[in-house]
Image (spheres, grey):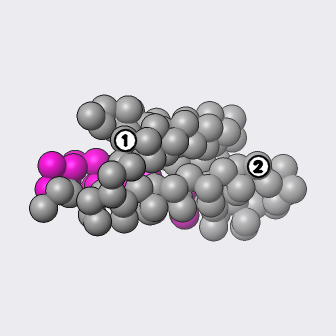
């Protein structure tokens, strides 16, 4: 199966997706939700892209490299936004996003 060579990336994508979803939900609970709007938006975008890339890998898509490039870009954007917020969930999300971006860049 094509996805077996990407097992580590699949795990990283899942961790990033889960972290973004947690951050998204936690941001909605913050006192100033308007201030968190861009973080919330990017959490959703990043989570969705990680999930889509994981699906593409497991079905052997011929576009995995291209999608991984886009995913890396989106993860970096989300990580950069999250690191601007002091909330623990944002900091953890930023770490997961940067780790995922690096993993996506290593796709051959």
Name the mark on residue 65: 1
Label 2: element kind: helix
On the rendered structure, is 68 left or right of 10?
A: right
What main secondary structure does the magenta stretch of the protein show? helix
Label 1: element kind: helix
Query: Callout 2: 10 Å neighbours few (<14), some, many (20+)?
Result: some
Q: Where 59 sits versus 83, above or below?
A: below
Q: Which is nearer the eye, 27 or 67?
A: 67
Name the mark on residue 45: none
- Using the rendered image of the protein, determine whether residue 70 is visible from the camera's viewpoint: yes
Q: Say which quarter of the image contains residue 21.
A: bottom right
Q: Is 37 in the magenta?
A: no
Residue at point 38% right, 32% down? 105
Reading the image, the residue beneath label 2 is: 38
Please give the range of residues in magenta.
4-21
The quadrant of the rendering that contains the C terminus is: top left
Residue at point 75% right, 61% down? 30
On the rendered structure, is 51 left or right of 27?
A: left
């Amino acid at each position: 199966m094509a996805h077996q060579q990407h097992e580590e990336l699949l795990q990283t994508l899942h961790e990033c997706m889960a972290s973004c979803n947690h951050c998204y939900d936690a941001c909605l609970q913050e006192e100033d939700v308007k201030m968190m709007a861009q973080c919330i938006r990017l959490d959703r975008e990043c989570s969705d892209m990680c999930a889509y890339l994981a699906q593409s890998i497991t079905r052997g898509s011929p576009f995995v490299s291209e999608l991984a490039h886009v995913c890396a870009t989106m993860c970096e954007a989300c990580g950069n936004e999250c690191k601007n917020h002091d909330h623990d969930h944002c900091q953890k999300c930023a770490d997961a996003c940067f780790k995922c971006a690096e993993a996506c860049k290593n796709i051959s």
